[in-house]
Every structure is written in C-alpha cells, then in structure tokens.
Amino acid sequence: MKILIVAPQPFFSSRGTPLSVYYRALVMAEQGAEIDLLTYGVGKDVDVSGVRIVRIPRVRWLEPVPIGPSLRKLLLDFLMVFWTIGLLTRNRYQAVDAHEESVFWCRFLKPVFRYKLIYDMHSSLPQQLSNFAYTKSKLLIGTFRWLEDICLRAADLVITVCPDLREYALKSGVAPERTILIENSVYDDVRVRAPAAQGERAHEPDRFGPGHPVILYAGTFEVYQGVEMLVEAFAMVLRQRPDARLLLVGGTEQQVKKIRELADSQDLGAACVLTGQLPKNEAMVYLRMASVLVSPRVYGTNTPLKIYEHLASGRPMVATRIWSHTQVLDDSVCLLVEPSAESLAAGLIEALTDQAGSDARVQEAMALFQREYSRPIYERKIRRALEIVT
C-alpha cells in the first residue's frame, strides 16, 4: 500500500521537531506501507526504511517557521498545495494522510485523484486560532470551523490524538467506525542532529552540583503552556527548598530572553537555567537527571505529547488539573494541582519531599503507560487504521 503523508511543518529543524509525524510514518512503514512524506523545505532528513521525505523549496525569508497559525505558514502552504498535486499526478497513492491544515486541500483533491483520505487530526484548527491568539474574528474562526466540518465528513478515516478530539469528531457527524484514537505516545530515540537556539546550556548532567533536586520543564514556551506561572511558582519553592533547581528546555531565543528576565526579577539567578531548543537526544539527558517533571499548562484541550513520555520516565510528575491533562492523568499517577502559581508551588514541594507518595505515583504511571500507551498498543492501532483504508 502506498501512502502520501502531507505534513505542513518544519520537519526535523532547529525550530521544531514534529516527532508525532515521524513516528506515524515509521510505524506505517514497519507495517508494510510505502510512505512518501511531503513537508516544508527547512529541516534535516532521517533515513527510515520505506519512507521517502519530499520537501518543498526552502524559502529562507519565511524562516523561522512559527508554531501555530501564521502568515508565513499560509505562504508555505501555497507551495505545499502545488507539490501535493505534483506528487498525486506522478504517483498512484491508495491513501493520503493529511495532517492539520493540509486536509483542506487534500479533501478537495480527493475526488480528482480517487484516494482514501485520512484526516490526521492533531488539533482543532479553529481552536488553534484562539489558543495562539491569532485572531478574534468570528468570521475567520467560523470559516475554519466550516472547513473543518466538511473535511471531517469527507474523510474515510479520522485519526484523533486525544479523547477530546475524538468526541469533537463524533459530534461533527463522523461515524464511530470511521474514527480511531491513536495517542502520540511513541517516543523512540530519533538520531538526527539539529542546532539548538542560544541559551544557558547545561552541557553536563551535574551542572547544578550534587544535592540539588532538579525540576524539569521541556516543551514550547507558548502562552498557554504556563511557563511564566512555573517561574513564579519556583520562586515560592525556593524559599522552602533553597536546594531545588529549575531547568527549562525549549523556547525561541526571544522567548528565552523574556523568561530569563522574569526569572531575574524573581531573584532566581543560577537556580534557574534555560537551555533554549535542543535536539531530542540531548533533551533526554536532562530528563534522566530530573527529580520532578512538570507540565504547567494553563488552558487547552489537547493532551501534550510529553505526557506519555513522562508516564514512562520513572520520574514523579506535577501537572495542572485541566482537561488537557486529566484526559490521561489522574491523582493515582500524577500530582495534580490547580493552574495557579501558589498551587503549583505547593505541588512541587510535595513532589520533592513526599518520597513515598511520589514512588507510588511513579509505579502507577509506568503501569498505565504499559497497559494503554506502549509501542505494541500504538502498533496495533496503526494496523487497524491501515485496515480501514485498505
């Protein structure tokens, strides 16, 4: 079976590494599918048997490509449309796996090229416009909602990545047999070198010295992630646990500068280190040195990709009690707190001091991951998806 994956993202670049797309292509290829992956021009390729990466021309004056909706992405997507048509013209694909906004043009090309359409729905596009504060225009948001609805109804299969999106798809009229929930829970090592942004690189696992428990946040620094709230919470933690350290992995150079200024205003000094964006293999070094993993997200409905990695990490977790997290997490596997600096600080202190409670939650978390989200479970769901569109 030959499948075209259309992923309008900076694939394996220093600006962003959409590992969920890589894993989808990897596991589909392992199940016998022949994959062409169409993506943006910026980035570095990875050799995967059965996967051919095809890139549109690189447009340097549109870089860096931001996360979320933007005019830059819109211009790049015009190129993506033409390259999609070119690939469809030259190849016979049984299915097209359309990620995010690419479903808009893949839906209208479907009757022309007669393929099965997979809508790989990693988020609701109208929700993205609001989450990234891109627009408040009811007309624009309504237009995206209309486009999303007709794409959902036209898709032969809708893959959603969290329960909230699955319910959204079902309420939009998608038949249950045409939906499958495949969480982004695979996180195998990806051996690709990508330069990191400027930051305060830790270099060695013992950067903070012995006897310093490390609280780790790794992810984007977008406003809904709650990084500013985390910094304010850590200032409260430090008053009770002066031995604690905060390590923040991710963020653009501008975002890192802003958070550094906030940390300095809270007199955190060397107790708070920001690394900037890192390749995954380097970020994994810091995950292994962490004493506590934290996800301080303040709003949203999609489950963060890192949550599955946290479940399997063997490290205690602290996360905010919002729907993004509670679709997967509960009090038995994670220390859930309210999305406020005071509550987050109290949760972090408890995770650092209550060893017995942390150990119990870690054991439950690892058991949950093996039972519901491990690689064999992911592979089984991919096989089912391929059966539906065969």
Image (spheres, helix red, strand yellow):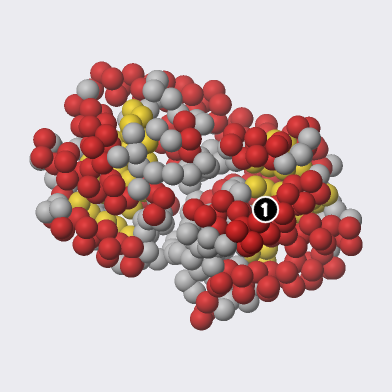
Residue 38 horizontal/vertical position (percent): 68, 63
**In the image: residue 78, left or right of residue 252:** right
Residue located 36% across and 59% down the image? 251
Task: Spot the residue most to the front.
Answer: 138
Q: Residue at x 39, y 49 (%)?
A: 225
Q: Which residue is mark 1?
A: 145
Q: Nearer the viewer, residue 135 or 179?
A: 135
Left or right? Give the position of 46 relative to 27. Answer: left
Q: Is residue 53 visible?
A: no
Quarter residue 214 falls in: top left
Based on the displayed image, in which of its 4 quarters is residue 72 positioned? bottom right
Q: Is residue 325 left or right of residue 292?
A: right
Mark 1 closeness class: few <14, some 14–19, many ≥20 residues within 10 Å: some
Whole-percent x and y of residue 291?
A: 26, 36
170 shown above or below 332: below
Identity of the residue drawn at 39% across and 44% down:
298
Residue nearest the viewer, comparing 26 with 175: 175
Amino acid carrying mark 1 in the image: Arg
**Residue 193 seen:** yes
Identify the element where label 1 is drawn: helix
Q: Residue furthest bottom?
A: 61
- Front residue of 382/302: it is 302
